[in-house]
Amino acid sequence: VFEVLKKHSVTMKFVCSDLQVSCQEIDEALADPEGLSWQVLNSAWDRGLTVSGQNAFPCYDREGYMKIVETAKPRNDPDRRHFSFFVYQQPLPLVQRTICFSELDCFIKCMHGEIAADLA
């Protein structure tokens, strides 16, 4: 599939889902959602695809933001691969009042490389 996408210069949009699955459910299903995500991303990058991202669910806290940064710009990638761009799903207007804008500002600076994620 990735070979065909590469042939047509497609940008793969990867939706970061951060599935909320209990450890027991994962063990019973022999599932590894995070491992599958990395397998898909690495396969796309290995074949030279441009990869972009989007959060599937709105997140408003430092932990959620840093998880997105780690997926978009993995620190341990020896090839320094990263998303070409990221679409941030904005919160609903009702929730906007509860967002900590300093956390959002830190997230944006990490995504732009203005500050290191591990210093945030």
Image (spheres, rainbow, N blue to C red):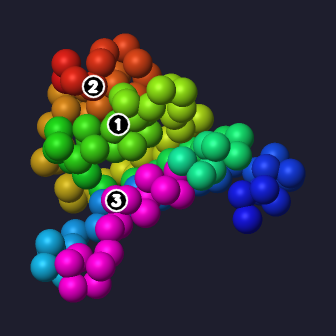
From the image, tell me which residue sits under label 1: 69
State how far apart marks 1 and 2 are (Cα): 7 Å
> What residue does disc 2 label?
117
> At 53% from the left edge and 38% from the top edge, which residue is drawn?
83
Mark before the other along the chain sequence, 2 or 3: 3
Prevailing SS of the magenta stretch = helix
Q: Dot 1: what SS?
A: helix
Is 98 covered by the magenta stretch?
A: no
Q: Is residue 94 above or below residue 108?
A: below
Q: Is residue 51 left or right of residue 89?
A: right
Query: Where does residue 27 sit, x and y in percent of width and height?
Result: 20, 78
| Crowding near the residue tagged with mark 1, few <14, some 14–19, many ≥20 C-alpha atoms within 10 Å | many
Pick out the residue farthest to the top.
114
Percent across and percent down for residue 64 are 23, 47
111 or 2, which is in the foreground?
2
User: Is residue 40 on the magenta stretch?
Assistant: yes
**Residue stretch in magenta:** 26-41
Residue shown at the point (72%, 58%) measured from the top left: 2
Q: Amino acid at mark 2?
A: Ala
Asked whether 100 or 113 is in front, the reply is: 113
Numbered disc 2: secondary structure: helix
Quadrant of residue 67 within the rendered picture = top left
Position above or below: 113 against 54: above
Quarter of the N terminus within the rendering? bottom right
Q: Residues within 10 Å of mark 2 (few under 14, many from 20)?
A: many
| Figure check: 80 above or below 62 | above
- The residue to which callout 3 is attached is 34
Disc 1 residue type?
Val
Question: From the image, which quarter does the C terminus lie in?
Answer: top left
Tell me the residue at 29%/79% (across/down). 30
